Image (cartoon, rainbow, N blue to C red):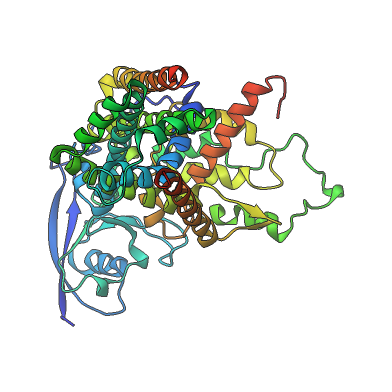
């Protein structure tokens, strides 16, 4: 676990940057503006056409995967320090990074197989 | 302005009490006094048994660090007039064991500082005949901020990670390691990387940033640690991709 | 000299204070720090929502319409609003801390914090604009 800490920190940093730059606009549009009707939501065929581009699929993969690793790393330390759950440190690490890996795998599978 | 201020000072006399207590003293208010002046007044005129550390009384020795109203401060650089009408609470620095009254034990920090090898490491030293090591103002600028550390320990007292994880190497030790890593005369970056990348090294830090806020010399230890994380991570990647390269 | 982190110096009369589990409520900076760390939960939440959206798109137009309707329910709208605030807090604190973590040197001199900050916010605006353009032009 210690040997790969630098890698986990790099993923955390990259994920944090992706989340900081892109999540506000995506969340505002998809989570508030479109459902509330402030702006017109893109039609299905538009999204389907967009998602056909390999670059868009790569973008979406990064958009989902890296922020999940950002969460995993940060949340793991929050539980460890904030709630002082020292005795569960391995379990917490496995659950957090495991969940991020699972989400990444799901994203990869969906984006690879979409037609 | 009032003529007296109440000062509540933490006391701990291990020979007669099992835990720290506190005593409140009424001290005269002088607008040019710092907290250290008030403590000296108490020791000289009111209660000679009060124990605390101080030395230069001008903010360069780092001896007089204490908590004033809950915030770590240098008592020689903290004006009493900022705390009137009071009461002012003076307590020993957090996260260090209390030896007596306001005196804490700093051995842990001293050991951690020695671990990061805070000296110029070179494969070969210049002989006097070779002359001095030359350094441009820009090269000096690269590490000067980190060299301002006076080892006052306010940063350790502000760092919640140090409180929760006593093995954590801590802000000042990393800032001082960076002071030498960034020095153009130094060749010991690889050695320090090994030490700082250990379990209790830089990776415990979660960038709370409180250390930088309380530092009286504007060393910015939080910045030093984050910059070092980036350096450490980059070196890790290059060592992975180019395992035969040694630096 | 290697210090063993598990060895505690034996001085029975030194008083060692215990750190309360509520340490983060003692001070505004600490509380703001924990709130900043909690933003990661909402970041993960939205990543999962987006994953859900992609799955809906993969399954077809009905699934996508269902997804949009579900996202429009009051429960999700409130959650999305709260998540949006936390994600904004994450973005602002992240950009504000970037100049400390990434020191750029140009021709020997350190680039000013304000410049790095400005570049980050400019990138944010540009990137957000690009995303909005792609999603809104139809």
Residue C38 lies, in percent from the top left, at 27, 39
The quadrant of the picture occupied by the C terminus of chain B is top right
- Nearer the observer, B124 or B190: B190
- Nearer the observer, B206 or B68: B206
Furthest-bottom residue in this view: B1
Identify the image quadrant of residue C51. top left
* Res. A91 in view: yes
Q: Does residue A106 sit above or below C90 in this rendering? A: above
Residue at x-position 19% and y-position 42%: C77
The quadrant of the picture occupied by the N terminus of chain B is bottom left
Residue B151 lies, in percent from the top left, at 45, 50
- Nearer the observer, A99 or A21: A21
Residue B133 lies, in percent from the top left, at 77, 51
Residue C55 lies, in percent from the top left, at 34, 23
Residue at x-position 41% and y-position 45%: A20
Identify the image quadrant of residue A30. top left
- Nearer the observer, A66 or B61: A66
Residue at x-position 40% and y-position 37%: B108
* Res. C35 in view: no
Determine whether, in the image, residue A15 is placed left or right of residue B193: left
Q: Does residue C8 sit above or below B154 in this rendering? A: above
Residue at x-position 25% and y-position 75%: B81
Q: How many circles with numbers are drawn on the protein? A: 0
């Amino acid at each position: 676990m210690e040997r790969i800490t630098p890698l986990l920190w790099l993923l955390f940093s990259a994920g944090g940057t992706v989340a900081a730059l892109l999540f506000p606009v995506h969340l505002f549009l998809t989570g508030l503006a479109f459902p509330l009707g402030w702006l017109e939501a893109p039609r299905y065929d538009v999204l389907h056409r967009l998602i056909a581009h390999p670059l868009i699929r790569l973008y979406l993969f990064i958009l989902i995967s890296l922020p999940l690793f950002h969460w995993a790393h940060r949340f793991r330390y929050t539980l460890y320090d904030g709630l002082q759950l020292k005795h569960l440190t391995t379990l917490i690490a496995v659950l957090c990074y495991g969940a991020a890996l699972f989400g990444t795998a799901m994203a990869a599978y969906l984006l690879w197989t979409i037609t | 302005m009032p003529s007296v201020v109440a000062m509540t000072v933490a006391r701990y006399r291990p020979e007669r009490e099992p835990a720290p207590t506190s005593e409140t003293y009424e001290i005269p208010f002088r607008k040019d006094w710092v907290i250290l002046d008030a403590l000296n007044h108490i020791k000289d005129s009111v209660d000679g048994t009060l124990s605390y550390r101080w030395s230069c009384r001008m903010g360069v020795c780092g001896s007089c660090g204490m908590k004033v109203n809950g915030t770590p401060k240098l008592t020689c650089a903290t004006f009493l007039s900022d705390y009137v009408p009071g009461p002012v609470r003076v307590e020993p620095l957090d996260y260090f064991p209390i030896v007596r009254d306001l005196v804490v034990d700093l051995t842990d920090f001293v050991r951690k500082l020695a671990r990061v090898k805070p000296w110029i490491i070179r494969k070969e030293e210049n002989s006097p005949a070779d002359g001095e090591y030359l350094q441009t103002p820009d090269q000096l600028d690269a590490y000067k901020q980190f060299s301002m550390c006076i080892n006052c320990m306010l940063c350790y007292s502000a760092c919640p990670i140090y409180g929760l994880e006593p093995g954590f190497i801590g802000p000042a030790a990393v800032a001082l390691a960076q002071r030498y890593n960034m020095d153009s005369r130094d060749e010991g970056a690889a050695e320090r990387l090994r030490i700082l990348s250990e379990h209790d090294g830089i990776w415990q830090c979660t960038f709370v940033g409180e250390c930088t806020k309380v530092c009286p010399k504007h060393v910015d230890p939080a910045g030093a640690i984050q910059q070092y994380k980036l350096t450490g991570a980059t070196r890790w990647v290059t060592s992975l991709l180019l395992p035969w390269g040694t630096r | 000299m290697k210090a063993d982190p598990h060895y505690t110096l034996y001085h029975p009369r030194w008083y060692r204070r215990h750190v309360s589990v509520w340490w983060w409520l003692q001070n505004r900076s600490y509380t703001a720090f924990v709130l900043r760390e909690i933003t990661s939960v909402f970041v993960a939440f939205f990543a999962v929502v987006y994953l859900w959206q992609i799955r809906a798109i993969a399954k077809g137009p009905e699934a996508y319409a269902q997804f949009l309707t579900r996202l429009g329910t009051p429960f999700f709208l409130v959650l999305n609003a709260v998540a949006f605030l936390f994600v904004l807090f994450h973005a602002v604190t992240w950009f504000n801390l970037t100049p400390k973590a990434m020191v750029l040197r140009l021709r020997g001199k350190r680039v000013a914090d304000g410049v790095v900050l400005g570049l980050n916010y400019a990138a944010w605006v540009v990137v957000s604009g690009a995303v909005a353009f792609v999603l809104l032009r139809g």
